[in-house]
Each structure stands twice: as C-alpha cells, then as structure tokens.
Amino acid sequence: MKLLIFVACVLVVAASTASAQCTFEITVQTGDRKDAGTDARVSLKVSSARGETLQINNLESWGQMSAGHDYFERANLDRFRGNGPCMSSEPCKMTISSDNSGNKPGWYLSSVTVAQLGLASHRWNVDQWLAMDEAPHQLFADRNGCGFVAAAP
C-alpha cells in the first residue's frame, strides 16, 4: 500500500511539473568575425536529460533588448526571456538553427546560455558558422552536454 501511495505521489509531481510554466532566460553571443551577424530567423530547442523540451520557433520574439535593437549582429550579446514548460532538471541538450533568410543569412555563433529561473543554467560553446557558404556548411548546431558538468557560473 505504501508503494502505491508513493507511486501516485511521484506521478502527481511529474504531471504538475510537465504542465507548469516556468521563466527562461537566454543569452546568445555572436562571434566577433567579419560578417558574423545575421538577419535570418533563429530558432532554439533545448531539452533536459529527461527529455523535457522547450521549443522557440522565433527567438527574437523573446527579445529583451531595447526597441529597434538589431539582434544577432557581430559581437552582440543578446538577451531573451519568456515562459515555457518547466524542466525538472537543467537544460543540457541544445539545437540552434537559422532559416537562411534575410540580407545576411550567414551567422557565426560563439555561445548560448539557457537558464530556467530557480534551476541551474547551462552554457554551450558553439564557435561555428551557421551558413551554407562556410564550413561546416549547415544551418544548425547541435550540442549535448547531458551527463557533463558544464553549468554556467
């Protein structure tokens, strides 16, 4: 009977975590290389080790910079904030992608940091072009830090 009550409590906690909304803060550091900035639409997907996922189809829509700010430009540190499904552990897997649109679609990305407020943050070093005309000739970067100690200070 005690086991049944324990299992029921775990399921209730898991269900409430899955449906709850949490606040996420994201920083994106564009590289300081010639033509590093982009006007393309950027999307971000992060997951916890347990598979809980946050998907942002237009990261700029979460932007926290001043009105008229030009996101994802050379050497910019851009800040974003929004709500999404809570994760029970830190985000540790990340895919960031560009839709290759706009006047300057190529983008050199240095790093991405994602924090769920009240939980540890995670920083991924990317140091890669998201461009078809620069190696590695792809419009996305995948980074998996699950199982590694890589939390931002």
Image (spheres, helix red, strand yellow):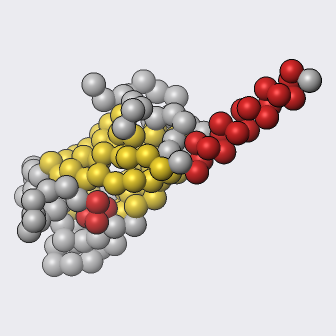
* 93 versus 45 height, above or below: above
Residue at 10% x, 50% y is: 75
Q: Quadrant of the C terminus?
A: top left
Q: Position of residue 40 (x, y in %)?
A: 25, 71
Marker count (numbered):
0
Q: Position of residue 107 (x, y in %)?
A: 22, 61
Task: Tell me if 145 is positioned left or right of 82 in this view.
Answer: right
Q: Nearer the viewer, residue 36 or 120?
A: 120
* 61 versus 17 height, above or below: below
Task: Tell me if 56 is positioned left or right of 25 in this view.
Answer: right
Residue at 70% x, 39% y is: 12
Q: Quadrant of the N terminus?
A: top right
* 28 versus 88 height, above or below: below
Q: Position of residue 134 (x, y in %)?
A: 25, 62
Q: Nearer the viewer, residue 56 or 84?
A: 84
Work out whether residue 134 can be spotted.
no
Q: Position of residue 66 (x, y in %)?
A: 9, 59
Q: Nearer the viewer, residue 76 or 119?
A: 119
* 143 versus 33 height, above or below: above
Residue at 48% x, 50% y is: 21
Residue at 58% x, 51% y is: 19
Q: Quadrant of residue 124?
A: top left
Work out whether residue 84 can be spotted.
yes
Outermost right residue: 1
